[in-house]
Image: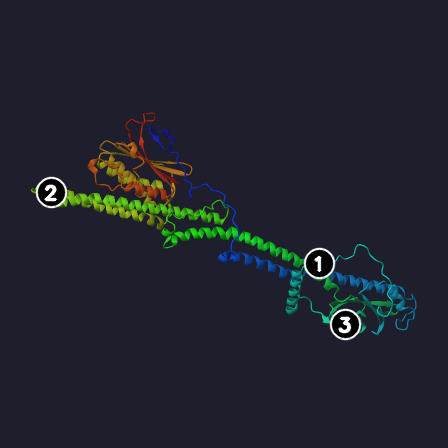
């Protein structure tokens, strides 16, 4: 509105540098908030919920992971495969010691010495080997012979692991729950001896290596049975068993490591939950406390100043948006309160003027001596009554305007068509007074999203004002220009123009800059209502005087111009 340039069609200046207004609350300087301490769990239910839910998630994850126990299944599968390979390898050793062409008997020792062969196989400590004849009779085992030494293997020395007391406690809880809920694969109770492998030997006589697991008081026992084939067929079965609880101990070590990781994750989750709760609960508590000051009945006594919502708009999250929204709502509320207070004061002032005149005329009426004096006083009374009636009606319309603008539904309409309809009526009114009415509207449609009736009320007010300020021989011009994202509707007249000091006041409530002959015919609310409607549509409205392009600013104006800018 400051860089004005001449139009191509006339020697007048049109302010058209207005653009679509930015929505939202005016941004303020955002200072960095000082770092806060951790919140108190006793005073923040939200913080307690955040911490509790995070802990529940970690605990459920840990329990499910231990319950599924992939480490246990993997170790069992690997051990069973290794045990089957060992059983087949040992049975192959026995078969290699059988005679090539003659039958052999494991029970009598014909063709083979079972104890001698078994003694030469290096069986590790904890592992047991049993030899059975084809009829299931035990022949020998590592319990009956002296074991040969096993060559040491370097690099497999186990390092002792130290477990925390809390880890042992958690493992005991897990074992108790597993025992109650029956976690893992059920195994039949068995003792690691020759008499315990009858079914396994019978199954291996079919020619395949058979795996089996059982358990005793010490732990789980894994067994593998592989047949020994001679010249005439299967002459026996070799059974290899692991030490009781060997896999269970490995699984327990893995569980202890997982539980240690779980404890660390739990502590980290608690710390992070406290930090998260602090960054969420503390700002929300500040916002709630600030809002409650304005809600409480004795808020003015506790805080005589205005309610101040903390400025958290620097946060790039929902709390920052909430802070900005609350600050905007509070600012709008205080603006409305101030506006209502000012409106009430203005209404009181405006009503007192006709009332004072009315009281004076009524008091003087009884002292009038002539009919002419009485008639003049009655005219004054009638004029003041009409003035009060018009004032009360306009005040009522202005006071309901905000609520009606919110309730009414906006829709798309053709602005050009609306202006054409209005121009037809006002052209007739202007013609009756000898005023030329000029329209310059585009032929293309201009779609506007808004309240057609309310915007029509604005244009009717501007056109009526322009006509009322003109005399016979003057002209009123209505024209429209479209820009990329806005449309300008201009109402011009060749009347006396607007005093420079009144250009910023004409949109104030109850302000009227009219000739003395029109005193009391207007309430001074028309332009104020028009501005309120235009701003509710996201637009602007301003007034300016029409001057020659390069004339002295102090020269007499050629008329007045009102410009309405609306976003498209």
C-alpha gap between disc 3 and disc 1: 31 Å
Verify CB contact (< 8 Å) between mark 3 and mark 1: no
Q: Quadrant of the C terminus?
A: top left
Instruction: Tell me the residue at 38%/38% (across/down).
Output: 487
Q: Earlier in the sequence, mark 3 or mark 2?
A: 3
Query: Helix, strand, or loop for circle 1?
Result: loop
Vertical side of 1 occupied by 30: above or below: below
Residue labelled with disc 3? 191
Verify CB contact (< 8 Å) between mark 2 and mark 1: no
Q: Quadrant of residue 89?
A: bottom right
Here the colouring is: rainbow
Q: Position of residue 60 (x, y in %)?
A: 60, 60
Residue labelled with disc 1? 162
Q: Position of residue 321 (x, y in %)?
A: 47, 48
Q: Image check: 62 left or right of 96?
A: left
Q: Quick one: which residue is furthest to the front in this view?
A: 302
Residue labelled with disc 2? 375
Instruction: Tell me the residue at 10%/46% (across/down).
Output: 366
Res. 231 visible in picture: no
C-alpha gap between disc 2 and disc 1: 115 Å
For disc 3, the neighbor class at 10 Å (few under 14, some 14 to 19, many from 20) is some
Q: Quadrant of the N terminus?
A: top left
For disc 1, the neighbor class at 10 Å (few under 14, some 14 to 19, many from 20) is few
C-alpha gap between disc 3 and disc 2: 131 Å
Vertical side of 557 occupied by 156: above or below: below
């Amino acid at each position: 509105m400051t860089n004005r340039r001449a139009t191509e069609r006339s020697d007048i200046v049109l302010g058209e540098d207005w653009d679509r207004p930015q929505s939202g609350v005016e941004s303020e300087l955002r200072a960095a908030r000082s770092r806060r301490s951790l919140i108190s769990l006793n005073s923040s239910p939200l913080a307690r919920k955040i911490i509790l839910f995070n802990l529940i998630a970690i605990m459920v994850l840990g329990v499910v992971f231990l319950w599924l126990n992939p480490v246990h299944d993997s170790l069992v599968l690997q051990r069973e495969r290794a045990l089957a390979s060992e059983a087949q390898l040992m049975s192959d050793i026995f078969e290699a010691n059988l005679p090539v062409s003659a039958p052999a008997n494991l029970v009598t020792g014909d063709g083979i010495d079972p104890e001698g062969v078994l003694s030469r196989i290096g069986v590790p400590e904890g592992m047991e080997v049993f030899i059975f004849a084809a009829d299931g009779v035990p022949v020998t085992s590592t319990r009956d012979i002296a074991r040969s030494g096993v060559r040491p293997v370097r690099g497999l020395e186990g390092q002792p692991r130290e477990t925390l007391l809390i880890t042992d406690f958690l493992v005991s809880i897990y074992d108790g729950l597993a025992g109650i809920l029956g976690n893992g694969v059920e195994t039949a109770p068995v003792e690691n001896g020759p008499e315990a492998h009858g079914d396994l030997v019978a199954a291996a006589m079919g020619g395949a290596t058979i795996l089996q697991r059982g358990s005793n008081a010490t732990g789980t026992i894994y067994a593998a049975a592989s047949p020994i084939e001679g010249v005439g067929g299967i002459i026996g079965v070799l059974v290899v068993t692991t030490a009781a609880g060997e896999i269970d101990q490995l699984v327990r070590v893995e569980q202890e490591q997982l539980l240690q990781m779980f404890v660390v994750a739990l502590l980290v989750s608690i710390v992070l939950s406290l930090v998260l709760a602090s960054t969420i609960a503390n700002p929300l508590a500040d916002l709630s406390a600030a809002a409650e000051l304005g809600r409480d009945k004795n808020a003015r006594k506790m805080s005589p100043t205005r309610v101040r919502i903390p400025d958290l708009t620097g946060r790039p999250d929902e709390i920052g948006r909430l802070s900005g929204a609350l600050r905007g709502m509070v600012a709008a509320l205080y603006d409305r309160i101030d506006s209502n207070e000012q409106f009430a004061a203005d209404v009181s002032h405006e009503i007192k003027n006709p009332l004072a005149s009315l009281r004076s005329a009524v008091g003087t009426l009884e002292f009038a001596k002539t009919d002419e004096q009485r008639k003049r006083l009655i005219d004054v009374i009638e004029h003041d009554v009409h003035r009060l009636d018009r004032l009360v009606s306009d005040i009522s319309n202005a006071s309901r305007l905000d609520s009606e603008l919110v309730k009414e539904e906006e829709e798309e309409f053709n602005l050009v068509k609306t202006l054409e309809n209005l121009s037809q009526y006002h052209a007739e009114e202007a013609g009756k007074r000898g005023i030329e009415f000029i329209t310059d509207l585009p032929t293309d449609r201009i779609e506007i999203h808004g309240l057609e009736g309310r915007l029509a009320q604005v244009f009717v007010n501007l056109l009526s004002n322009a006509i009322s300020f003109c005399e016979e021989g003057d002209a009123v011009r209505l024209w429209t220009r479209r820009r990329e994202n806005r449309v300008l509707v201009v109402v011009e007249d060749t009347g006396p123009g607007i005093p420079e000091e009144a250009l910023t006041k004409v949109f104030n409530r109850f302000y009227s800059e009219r000739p003395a002959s029109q005193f009391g015919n207007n309430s001074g609310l028309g332009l104020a209502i028009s501005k309120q409607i235009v701003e509710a549509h996201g637009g602007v409205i301003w007034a300016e005087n029409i001057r020659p392009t390069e004339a002295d600013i102090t020269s007499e104006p050629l008329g007045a111009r009102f410009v309405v800018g609306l976003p498209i």
